[in-house]
Image (tube, grey):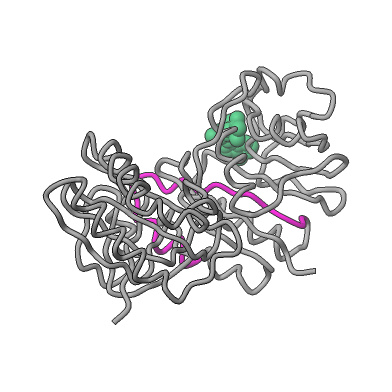
Amino acid sequence: MPTALHVGQKGFEAFLAKEAGSPLEKGPGWVLSQEARQDLCFAHLSLLEPAVFEAPTANALAGKIADFFLETSRSERYEAPWPLCFEAAGAEGLSARARTVEKAFLEKTSRMARVMKLAEQGRPGPGESRGLFVHFVDFKRAFASRRAFGGGQRRMADDAQAPSRSYLKVEEAYLVLGEAPAKGQSVVDLGAAPGGWSFSAAKRGARVLAVDNGPLKGGAAEHPLIEHRAEDAFKFKPAQRVDWLFCDLLEEPRKALDLLRRWVEAGWCRRFVVNLKFGRNDPLPLLREARGLETLCRALKARHLYHDREELTLTGILKP
Ligand SMILES: C[S@@+](CC[C@H](N)C(=O)[O-])C[C@H]1O[C@@H](n2cnc3c(N)ncnc32)[C@H](O)[C@@H]1O
């Protein structure tokens, strides 16, 4: 039976377990599931069919992981860069442990100089990739696999001119989608204030209609590419189809999802980034409903972003 170790944000493992199905074991920020499902909202990285290694010392763990890597590399051809990802979540000091084991692993595999020169350390990009993925669940136990699925989540760099932390979410959403607003494109930003998302699009040269009764601040206030409209997002209709719909409303998530459905069905936008704030409610029914939009989209991704809290983000490109 294929298994997967899904890694997500600490504190959200109950949702991750529900979404992954058939959980065998879980801990802070991770779930081991009997099913190897991919493309989960609450998983940032899924190690597919992982092996588990246990040893009392960092050196012994590194030796076991190096043996696993050598063994599974025999029939492998390394012609291009490949991801090498050692990670940990949960207990304090576990990340340092992962780094120590990674260092010892690199020493033990140094005789494979040509292969190791192609290794790119860190999280893989979105989608399935082949490499070596190691996740520590405690000091003596790590899961390792040669295949993983990345959701595309990543910690983003802030911009001093951005008026809100929300800015980081939309920046991260572009990575998940694989596209960002470009110069000359049009954006409608519903629930725009204080303007983090609008600022993010405008700094790339897009023209933004920022809809919110609240004021824009910081780099979004008086920005020449941002027009502020003090209107109700639910009543707003664009004069013509826009390149991007942004929606980050402090509203009941079902209402925001209905609003997105209306925009998608009417074809009022080409792409979207929409944040749904589920608060203390179970987000799984909402997620199932959101996935119903898949028939109208070329790419629909639902992600619990690195910068999301009790909310999730939908990104999509409409079918032509
Ligand atoms: C989380 S904030 C948006 C933050 C923004 N994305 C940013 O980057 O700065 C939510 C916003 O939704 C707005 N909002 C809530 N209901 C609205 C509605 N019906 N119409 C317009 N704006 C609304 C609130 O005024 C608030 O400014």
The number of numbered discs placed on residues in the rendered structure image is: 0
In the orientation shown, which residue stands out farthest toward the left? Answer: 56
For ligand 1, the image quadrant comes to top right
Query: If the image is split into quadrants, where does the C terminus sit?
Result: bottom right
Please tell me in which quadrant of the rendered image residue 161 appears. top right
Farthest residue to the front: give it. 111
Quadrant where the image shows the N terminus: bottom left
**Left or right of 117 on screen, residue 162:** right
**What is the magenta range?**
269-289
Of 178 and 95, the residue lying toward us: 95
Residue 185 appears in which quarter of the rendering? Answer: top right
Q: Residue at x 28, y 36 (%)?
A: 96
Regarding residue 110, the answer to whether it shows in the image is yes
Q: Going by the image, does 225 lie left or right of 11? A: right
Which residue is more in the foreground, 131 or 265?
Answer: 131
The verdict on residue 284 being magenta is: yes
Q: Residue 313: image x %, image y %?
A: 53, 50
Left or right: 206 as drawn, with respect to 295: right
Name the residue at 40% across, 61% down.
Answer: 46
x 26%, y 52%: residue: 62
Inspect the magenta stretch and tell me whether residue 272 lies in it.
yes
Q: Position of residue 287 (x, y in %)?
A: 46, 62
Does residue 254 show up? no
Q: Position of residue 184 (x, y in %)?
A: 88, 41
> Which residue lies at the image location 14% right of the left edge and 54% below the top edge?
55
For the residue pair 15 and 261, the one nearer the viewer reads as: 15
